[in-house]
Image: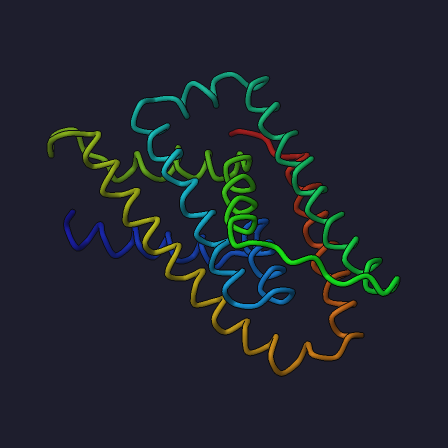
């Protein structure tokens, strides 16, 4: 990939990775609640689901999905339901603490799974791959499938690196600013509200 195309492509990747959205709210919520390791595991789940997006673009499945709005609506409604479920889980933690019930211990696999499913059910991610990757694919340069693979790999690397750095710095906020139980409570309310906000935004998501 020529340097004059690589630079704008990676710039787009970093901008999208740093743009607040459901994925960021999810891994930040887990970082504040369970620490950096949980945030990194969630980010790993998010980036793993991009493998499906790359495969879908490479085999034309994303175009097929976007060409059938009813199918895309099913994915969208599943994504909305999942976001609302995550917000409910976050608020449930507040109820447990107020009732004196110990916070449940979750395995890293749970954080990974939440990140994977959340991103997989986000039609915005499918649309992102469908609209951006093809702009950097040139059939005259060889195998389209290989070009999609390289572009997808660069996107996953850039996104995962950025997300991990965000989690790293968010960990300092956890250590120094959120030890106070009242802060933790308001943080959960805030994060849950943002997750619900993104669910509402997804409700009005339209292609084109």
Residue projecting furthest to the bottom: 176
Q: Nearer the viewer, residue 79 or 9?
A: 79
The picture places residue 14, in percent across and down from the top left corner, at: 39, 57
Classify 115 as above or below 77.
below
Place residue 71 in its image quadrant. Answer: top right
Image point (46%, 34%), residue name: 126
- Is residue 162 toward the left or the right of residue 201 in the image? left
Q: How is the image coloured?
A: rainbow
The image position of residue 16, as x and y in percent, is 45, 52
Q: Residue at x 20, y 30 (%)?
A: 144
Relative side of 4 to 32, left or right: left
Q: How many marks?
A: 0
Which residue shows up at 29% across the image and 54% down it? Answer: 8
| Residue 183 figure quarter | bottom right
Q: What's the residue at 47%, 21% (across, down)?
A: 65
**In the image, residue 16 above or below residue 127:** below
Can you give x and y, in whole percent of width and height, for residue 79 in the image?
Answer: 62, 35
Q: Is residue 129 above or below residue 64?
A: below
How far across and how far down the image is residue 138, in percent? 18, 33
């Amino acid at each position: 990939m020529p340097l004059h195309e690589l630079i704008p492509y990676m710039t787009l990747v970093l901008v999208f990775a740093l743009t607040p959205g459901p994925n960021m709210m999810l891994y930040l919520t887990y970082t504040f609640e369970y620490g950096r390791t949980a945030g990194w595991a969630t980010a790993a789940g998010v980036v793993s689901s991009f493998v499906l997006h790359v495969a879908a673009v490479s085999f034309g499945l994303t175009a097929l999905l976007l060409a059938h709005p009813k199918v895309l609506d099913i994915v969208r409604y599943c994504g909305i339901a999942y976001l609302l479920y995550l917000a409910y889980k976050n608020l449930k933690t507040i109820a447990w603490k107020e009732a004196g019930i110990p916070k449940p211990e979750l395995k890293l696999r749970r954080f990974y799974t939440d990140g994977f499913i959340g991103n997989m059910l986000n039609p915005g991610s499918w649309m992102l791959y469908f609209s951006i990757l093809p702009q950097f694919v040139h059939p005259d340069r060889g195998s389209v499938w290989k070009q999609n693979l390289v572009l997808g790999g660069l996107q996953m690397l850039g996104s995962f690196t950025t997300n991990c750095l965000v989690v790293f710095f968010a960990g300092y906020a956890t250590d120094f600013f959120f030890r106070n139980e009242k802060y933790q409570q308001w943080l959960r309310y805030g994060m849950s509200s943002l997750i619900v906000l993104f669910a509402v935004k997804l409700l009005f998501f339209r292609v084109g």
